[in-house]
Image (cartoon, rainbow, N blue to C red):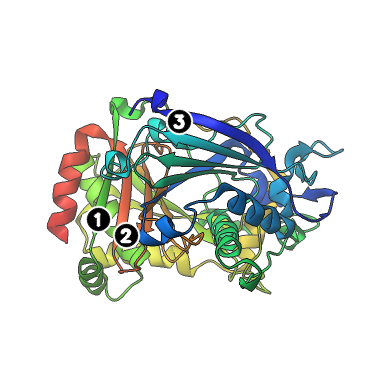
Amino acid sequence: MDSEVVHVVESSLVVPSEPTPSEGLSLSPLDLVLPSRGHTPTVYLYSPSDVAAADGFFDVARLKEAMAKTLVAFYPLAGRLGVNNDGRVEITCTGEGALFVVAHADLSVGDIEDDFRPSPELRRLFVPCIEPASIILAIQVTFLKFGGVVLGTALHHTASDASSAFHFFQTWSALCKYGDRATVELPCHDRTLLRARSPPTVHPDALSRFYPKLTFSDDPLGSGPLAIEVFAISKDQVASLKRLCGGTSTFCAIGALVWQCALVVRRLPPDAEARLTFPANVRRRVRPPLPSHYFGNALVRLGATGAVRDVASEALASVAGRIKDAVDRVDDELVRSAVDYYEMTEMDSRPVKGTLPETDLQIISWLGMPMYDVDFGWGKPAVMSRADSVRGGLVYLTSDGPTGGGGVRVLMCMEAANMKELERLLYAKL
């Protein structure tokens, strides 16, 4: 796909349709860990349908009107990243608006749907270029030839985690589809709910259970070029895998499978320490629990470790048990200690680059999130994905499509040399 095939025809700012608060929004330490992550790019592919033909498919004026209404409740997304008087990053709620780009592409749905996987090219084609970088939310609606649309989004990670991002897109699409009849769950913007204690205190046990930093390098162990593959695991395969793992959660079962297979194909020294990390949603783990629609970042990175020889050879149920143990040990004190740790620690705000060491994997799960519940009135997306290629050693778990069939897509980024063997082993174990 050549970037020349996409032509931008309009670029504008969509502002909230009513007056909104105009002060600076203080961020929690869990937000401030993330400035270096920049904007999270996602893409939604919508195929033309009978509904689309009858009713102004992706009518831009209707989309903008609904977004303007949505930004009243989600007003921080119409603001800009700024710095307060203490030099701390904040969201300055200026109401300047979200970037909204309209484009046309000399591509059809058929040209892109078979290989709709993250790549620098997918991002370049369908996710708007953000200028200035302080813009928090940017959208691009790209009309394809013969019908169909790609919706590209970029939302700064400092403003929201995946759970909050999907809440915004769910609300915007519902207001577009149903107008004033839409049922809207209002977001909670009180980020002081996750502020540090006074004085900040890190419980000694907490440091062994959460992993504040990941180590990236340009080419660890000379592992060579990276590859990205998407492995589809069917509903029946998920069910049998969970039984094999003693009836554990989908996340723990698939995490165990991917972790063990990656260690086997990488042929690492048996005594090396293997580490699997994953961000956990802590909204329900603090006391009192956060409001279900707390808007911001409520993620703490957990980890499971073990000697390579053990994790690579033990029963999958045991590997899943290591992950479940890490999940089960999250409590209010762990979360508060993590918040206080980040408050006291100067985190590196430079963009994160490179690849995880071969002993490490990080799994990001969007399982159970309403990632396909983005119907603007012309049907749900046929495919939804991250737009950009992820770093080596990162794995994304997502549901397998809009029907909620119970299958899982595993998006894997690792050294190309081991990818075929990983695929063979993974499906052999299923």
User: Which one is closest to the eye, mark 3 or mark 2?
Assistant: 3
Instruction: Name the disc covering residue 124, or none.
Output: 3
Residue for badge 2: 400
> Which residue is pictured at 49% across the width and 60% down the height?
374
- Position in image of residue 275 (x %, y %): 38, 48
> Which residue is pictured at 60% across the width and 30% down the height?
350
Q: Amino acid at mark 3?
A: Arg
Q: Residues within 10 Å of mark 2 (few under 14, many from 20)?
A: many
Contact check, label 2 and label 1, Cβ < 8 Å: yes
Q: Secondary structure at mark 3?
A: helix
Residue for badge 1: 232
**Left or right: 62 with respect to 29?**
left
Quadrant where the image shows the C terminus: bottom left
**Residue 213 vertical placement versus 336 (above, below):** above
Q: Residues within 10 Å of mark 3 (few under 14, many from 20)?
A: some
- Position in image of residue 399 (x %, y %): 36, 61
Q: Secondary structure at mark 1?
A: strand
Quadrant where the image shows the N terminus: top left
**Left or right: 399 with respect to 258?**
right
